[in-house]
Amino acid sequence: MKYQDNMSQVATLQPDYLGFIFHESSPRNFEGTISELPNTIKKTGVFVDKTVEFIAGQIERYQLDAVQLHGHESPEVCKLIKSANVEVIKVFSIKDEFDFSVLTAYEDVCDYFLFDTKGKLPGGNGYTFDWSVLNNYPSTKPFFLSGGIGLEQLEKIKEFKQSPASKYCYALDVNSKFEIEPGLKNIELLNKFKIQINARH
């Protein structure tokens, strides 16, 4: 999210999380004021290889409830951030395959994993990876599914939900496929997606 009026509109759809990107080179970089949001919505800061001090500062400034780490953050960094009493979501990017052994070191220092599509940017690339890779997911930690999810993926999501890969899928992370421009969400499309997801599941 980037614009106050848009945040308030999206909040009426009652998402579980709203993301705010703190990454200067991103067209979605957030520097504004967060609207008053319902307590049911978790304000989530998205960071890429930032210092613990910078992340802690943004947690305090914006009263963040969760932090999504999109870079090469170590387990030690995750542990330090988790001690700030926020949810820690560690992102891992997948293309055609993935070495799940890298997750082991993060098991005890993250609340969730997030699997995104490996691309040129650390997120917001707008296309999906092969979700069947997650059939080999060895953990019981709940995860977010991300990467180019839009209305055209509804049937694919239905199939995914019926596969072993979805057992620990906790949430769907949507972004670029619902944008009018970077950081500005299309409320009509989001509402349509929400209605159809709920109707199918």
Image (tube, helix red, strand yellow):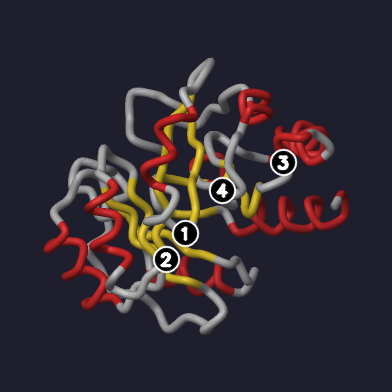
Task: Report the side of 188 relative to 109 (left or right).
Answer: right
Tell me the distance, in whole angstroms, between the alpha carbons under discs 3 and 1. Answer: 17 Å
Q: Nearer the viewer, residue 136 or 87?
A: 136
Identify which residue is drawn at 20% across, 41% down: 25
Residue 61 pos. (x, y %):
22, 77
Q: Which amino acid does label 1 sit on?
A: Asp
The circle on residue 144 is: 4
- In which quadrant is the N terminus drawn? bottom left
Q: Is mark 3 on a helix, strand or loop?
A: helix
Q: Distance between the residues labelled 2 and 4?
A: 13 Å
Residues at circles 1 and 2 in contact by the CB criterion of under 8 Å: yes
Q: Which of marks 1 and 4 is in front?
A: 1
Of mark 1 and mark 4, the one earlier in the sequence is 1
Residue named by callout 1 = 111
Amino acid found under the numbered disc labelled 4: Phe
Q: What x and y, as percent, mark residue 45?
A: 34, 61
Q: In this figure, which residue is indicated by the disc labeled 3?
A: 166
Q: Residues within 10 Å of mark 2 (few under 14, many from 20)?
A: many
Residue at 39% in and 46% down = 106
Can you say whether 142 is above or below 152 in the image? below
In space, the residues marked 2 and 3 are separated at their CA atoms by 21 Å
Residue visible at 40% across and 73% down in the picture = 65
Sequence-wise, the earlier of marks 2 and 4 is 2
SS state under label 2: strand
Judge left or right: residue 63 versus residue 94: left
- Mark 2 sits on what residue? 87
